[in-house]
Image (cartoon, helix red, strand yellow):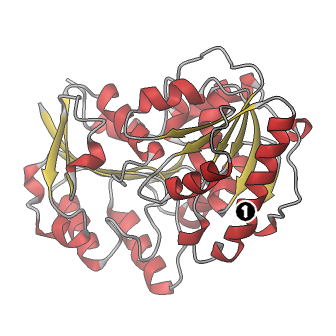
Amino acid sequence: MKKVFLMAYARKNLGDDIFIKMLLEKYPKIDFFMRIKEKEFLEGLVKYKNLKILIGEDTDEELYKMNEDEFDAYVYIGGSIFMEGGKVYNLSEKFFDFVNRCKNKNIPFCYISCNYGPYQTKEYFELSKRNFSICSDICFRDKYSYNLFKDIDNVRYAPDFAFNYKIPQNEKIENSIGITVINLDIRHDLKHIAQEYHKFLINNINYYLKKGYKVYLYSFCKHEQDEIIMEKLMKEFLNNPKVEEVRYDGDIDKFLNTYSQMEYMICARFHAIILSCLCKQKMFVMSYSKKIDNVINDLELNLPILYFHKTDRRHIISKEKFQIVDEKKIVNIMEKAKEQDMFFGKKVKNN
C-alpha cells in the first residue's frame, strides 16, 4: 500500500468532507494519512479503511517538522486554502521549505481543486509564486486564480472536483424549497448586515409558507457557526411542521439524501451551487465571495445572484426568479472536472 499525506480543511465542513470521501473511494489501495487536532472532525469518514488519522495540529509548523521520506506523496485538497492568514495549513516560509524538500527528493506534492486569495500583501503573493513553481502540480478550480499564475508550467485549471461526486437522484418533494444558511457574524466584511439577513430569511420563509411550501434550512458547517443562525430562525417558527432543519453532522449520505429531494434551492454556500447543479434543482444564488461569482461566470451557469451586501429584508425571491442549469452543460463540466486529480492519479498509481 502506498502512503499519501493528505491535507484538507478537516472541520466537518460538507464540501471539504466530500473532497476527502471522493479521494478515499477513488483510490482504495492508497492509505491516506491526515493530521487533525480533534478526531471528531472526521468521524463520518473513519469507516474507510484507507483513512489513517494522526492526532495533532494541522499547521505549517508541524508539517515542517515531518520527515518528507515518510510518505510517497503529499496532497493538499480544498477550496480557499490560499487565504493569507488562514487557520489551517497556510503558505509560510516553513511550508515552502517542506515543499522544496519534497521537490529535491522527487516526492510529488500536489494541490487539487483550490482557488487563490484573498490576499493582502505582495510578500504573500510572491511566496505563493515560489511555492507553485516548485510543487509537482496545482489545479485551480477558477480561471481568476489560474490567470494569476498561468505562466508557471505546472499550473492548470479544471472545474471543481466535486462535480464528479456521485449524488443520489431522488424524487423531488413536491412544493419544497431548501435554504442554505451562513453566519454573517463571523465574517468581518458582512457582519454589519447580519440582522438584515435574518429578517430577509424570515420574510422569505413566511412567503413560501403562505404559498403552501415546506421549507428546509440547511447547515453545511457547525464549526463555522451555521447552526447558530439556524437555531435563531427555528425559534421564529416553533411548532411549525412546515419548517425543518437539516444539519450536517458528518454523515454525507444522510444529508444529501434530503438535500437532493428539493425542488428549489437558495444557495449561499459554494458547494451548494455544485450540488444543486448535480441534483438538477432550480436555483437562486446568494453570493458572499468572488469565488462564487467566478464559478458561475467561468462555467457560464447563468444563475440569478443576490449579493449579500445588497440584502434587503423586503426582497422576496419568488419562484419565477429561480433557474435550472442545462443538463448537457453539466455533463460537459463533469467531464472537464475529471482533470482535477489527473496528475495525482498518474503519479501515485492505484495498484
Task: Quickly name the residue at label 1.
Answer: 197
In percent of the image, x 78 and y 27: which residue is there?
A: 326
Residue furthest to the right: 320
The vertical placement of 101 against 125, above or below, is above
Q: Quadrant of residue 93?
A: bottom left
Of the 4 image quadrants, the one containing the C terminus is top left
Q: Quadrant of residue 184?
A: bottom right
Nearer to us in this view, 247 or 47: 247
Can residue 8 be seen here? The reply is yes
Q: Is residue 346 left or right of residue 223?
A: left
Residue furthest to the front: 239
- Picture coordinates of residue 294, whole percent (x, y): 68, 55
Q: Is residue 43 left or right of residue 196?
A: left
The vertical placement of 37 against 13, above or below, is below
Q: Quadrant of residue 130?
A: bottom left
The vertical placement of 259 against 77, above or below, is above
In percent of the image, x 67 and y 43: which residue is there?
A: 179
- Picture coordinates of residue 273, whole percent (x, y): 65, 41
Q: Is residue 160 left or right of residue 86?
A: right
- Picture coordinates of residue 167, whole percent (x, y): 52, 24
Give SS at disc 1. helix
In percent of the image, x 19 and y 73: which residue is there?
A: 61
Can residue 158 be seen here? The reply is no
Q: Disc 1 residue type?
A: Tyr
The vertical placement of 37 against 301, above or below, is below
